[in-house]
Image: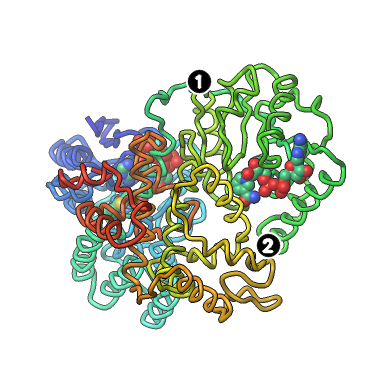
Amino acid sequence: MAVDYTTHDGVAVITLNNPPVNGLGLSTRAGIVEGIERAQNDPAIKAIVLTGAGKAFSGGADITEFNTPKATQEPTLATVIKAVEGSAKPVVAAIHSVAMGGGLELALGAHYRIAAPGAQIALPEVKLGILPGAGGTQRLPRAIGLEAALNMIVSGAPVMSEKLADSGLFDEVVQGDLAEAALAFARKVGAQAGPHPKVRDRKIEHPNAAGFIQFARNTVAAMAKNFPAPGKCIDAVEAGVQNGFDKGLAFERECFIALVQTPESRALRHAFFGERAASKIPDVPSDTVVRDIRQVAVIGAGTMGGGIAMNFINAGIPVTLLETKQEALDRGLATIRKNYEATVKKGKLKPEALEQRMALITPTLSYDDLKNADLIVEAVFEELGVKEQVFKRLDEVAKAGAILASNTSTLDVDKIAAFTKRPQDVVGMHFFSPANVMKLLEVVRGKETAKDVLATVMQLAKKIKKTAVVSGVCDGFIGNRMIEQYIRQALFMLEEGALPAQVDRAIEKFGFAMGPFRMSDLAGNDIGWAIRKRRYLEHPDMHYSKIADRLCETGRFGQKTGGGWYDYKAGDRTAYPSKVVDDMIGAFSKEANVERRKIGDEEIVERLVFALVNEGAKILEEGIASKASDIDMVYLTGYGFPLHRGGPMLYADTVGLYNVERAIRRYAARTNGDAWQLATSIAELAAKGQGFNG
Ligand code: 3HC
Ligand code: NAI
């Protein structure tokens, strides 16, 4: 039973009991209505308390029910709220921990609300691409005023209950025992004659509502570029202001039904569940006992090591930072300090916190100082020989049970593990640059990595606010292995007729933060060159366009050399199309006997994105990733894939795998075919009319 009903001396207590967050699924909704009716029919009951068991009042509608028959089956949330609001006996919502979305809307339907401090109060629907669909856009402005409500609705951000103490939302914010206080409050109002107050009857007072609504519309315009929901939130609030509660409510409902079916909402819900699913590893039970991580060590204080260390100290975990030379150590520490100083300057960190954080770092040149570390992350030069030296040394000094992690981006984690006598303790922790900023962490599971090591690293990732995704061992892991195919296609298209600015423009219009050529100029074209040189040796039969090598041979490594695929002016990061490069591309096509043709934006987007999808499908087939949503999380958090499209695999589902297959076959027939070995799973799923996500 998802709802408990108990009576306490004239007060009925309806307790939502649907772990983990008392989502308002069908059985919970039915239980609430039943409880309200039961209380009406019991003459001994004078008042009703509505509350939640466990760690929430309620986290809102059950998102897993969206677009299923259960979502619209009676009693809907609207019916539940009507029953609560229409109760002849006063209903007191007793809120603690979390009241979000439908949970807050339910509480707004009660006649009275009391709250414990520290409860997160929010209407976060906009973050799922929808709007509050059970009266939130109508009742919250009536409860706390137009401006405060619109801010909450459009941002979706939680506000602490104590901050809302005087807002009009709560009748009391209670310091002591909430359950006791709720009973006492209910007895008090139960003794008063009705009718009891309803939020819907309050007026929205604002000196210039129309002006503020227009201001809000302007404010969300940029953020709402790819998402319809923020604008609809404003429309719904406006409808209530202009036409009254009932018309506003009906309009809100219409908008909700339309939004919940949009691809943008599907993408955002996919990302919400994808993030949570990523931390679940199929063969690692959720109750696996994790290792205690109190002390971390980082080897190498370069670009990555410094950023990695910052992640841990930001979470209050002390870090020992080891380098080979004092100068390198000093340089690394100075960079960390500079990063924190920049954060202080922006007002995002208190000056005294800077010193507290720096004090958590113990710099050292000696491996003896690593013997207490529970986790050691290696971030030294990307050479197997150097990794070998480091891991052999770590094997000697690290305490038993310490986790030994490598930040390698291209080397074989199994080979690294084999340098030690404890391969079960070795794992890849592939951070992305800048490591203190980027959310993605690929956790590379070696063939011997112990399950509790994985569980520990996944839990730790949450603590340092990363989205961790498990990848098996393969060249490039999930993210870089896929991006290689995307870049190959980008280069082929230059050879066939496109120019860098056209390719970038098309994929940026699709929603990527930065196209492949601007990105490559930023990262340094020499990095890709070095990788390709290795590839030519490893896979001499694989077809690559040599056009990027030609660029690198002229020394155009990107922004750092003042020119790459584009021209740059000193002190200006703007990418200016380069006549020199465009001529070079034309000449290259001629030499290669390729007749240049006009390549449309649609082809550019399909070839880039389907190259990701095709490789992603192979990654799934090989078990390198355990689910399609993991791949999407890698691309959403590490590669700037547009959030409103939900990641490459969800996007492929949205387009339909039948269409993806047809496009890939078409490109394989027309263009460099060996780059398009269709993944068998795409054809299989397409034949069954299925997608990667079912
Ligand atoms: N529906 C279904 N499942 C939900 C859920 C919801 N509304 N909210 C959370 N969950 C699930 C999570 O998927 C997770 O499941 P798992 O353990 O199987 O992975 C579990 O609850 C715990 O969630 P978290 O890991 O996020 O736990 P936290 O304690 O860190 O956070 C929370 C709790 C703040 C409630 C957070 O889960 C959250 O922000 N949830 C989303 C809240 C939300 O968006 N509500 C609005 C729903 S839409 C709505 O109400 C429409 C209405 O207007 C008609
Ligand atoms: P870097 O060259 O900036 O830093 C490496 C540091 O390691 C230097 O400070 C060097 O003095 C130190 N070092 C070298 N040998 C050492 C040893 N034996 N013991 C202790 N310290 C030693 O390199 P970067 O970019 O930080 O890369 C480090 C690792 O991270 C590499 O494995 C790389 O592939 C990986 N990586 C790099 C990314 C990037 O964007 N730079 C992204 C993800 C992973």
Q: Which residue is mark 2?
A: 347
Q: Quadrant of the N terminus?
A: top left
Q: Nearer the viewer, residue 95 or 590?
A: 590
Measured from the top left, where is residue 375 in percent x and y? 65, 29
Q: Mark 2: which amino acid?
A: Gly
Residue at (39% x, 24% y) in the render: 283
The mark lying in front, picked from 2 and 1, is 1
Residue at (40% x, 54% y) in the render: 122
Measured from the top left, where is residue 592 in percent x and y? 45, 67
Q: Nearer the viewer, residue 241 or 172?
A: 241
Secondary structure of the residue carrying tag 2 is loop
Q: Which residue is mark 1?
A: 289
Which of the 4 image quarters holds residue 644?
Answer: bottom left
Q: Is residue 367 above or below residue 640?
A: above
Instruction: State the CA–CA distance, disc 2 to disc 1.
Output: 39 Å
Measured from the top left, where is residue 668 in percent x and y? 30, 56
Q: Is residue 4 above or below residue 84?
A: above
Q: Is mark 1 within 8 Å of ligand 1?
A: no
Q: Nearer the viewer, residue 643 or 42?
A: 643
Q: Residues within 10 Å of mark 1 (few under 14, many from 20)?
A: few
Q: Is residue 672 above or below residue 531?
A: below
- Figure quarter occupied by ligand 1: top left
- Residue 87 visible within the image: no
Measured from the top left, where is residue 412 in percent x and y? 56, 33
Q: Quadrant of the C terminus?
A: top left
Q: Mark 1: which amino acid?
A: Val
- Residue 571 visible within the image: yes
Secondary structure of the residue carrying tag 1 is loop
Residue at (70% x, 33% y) in the render: 385
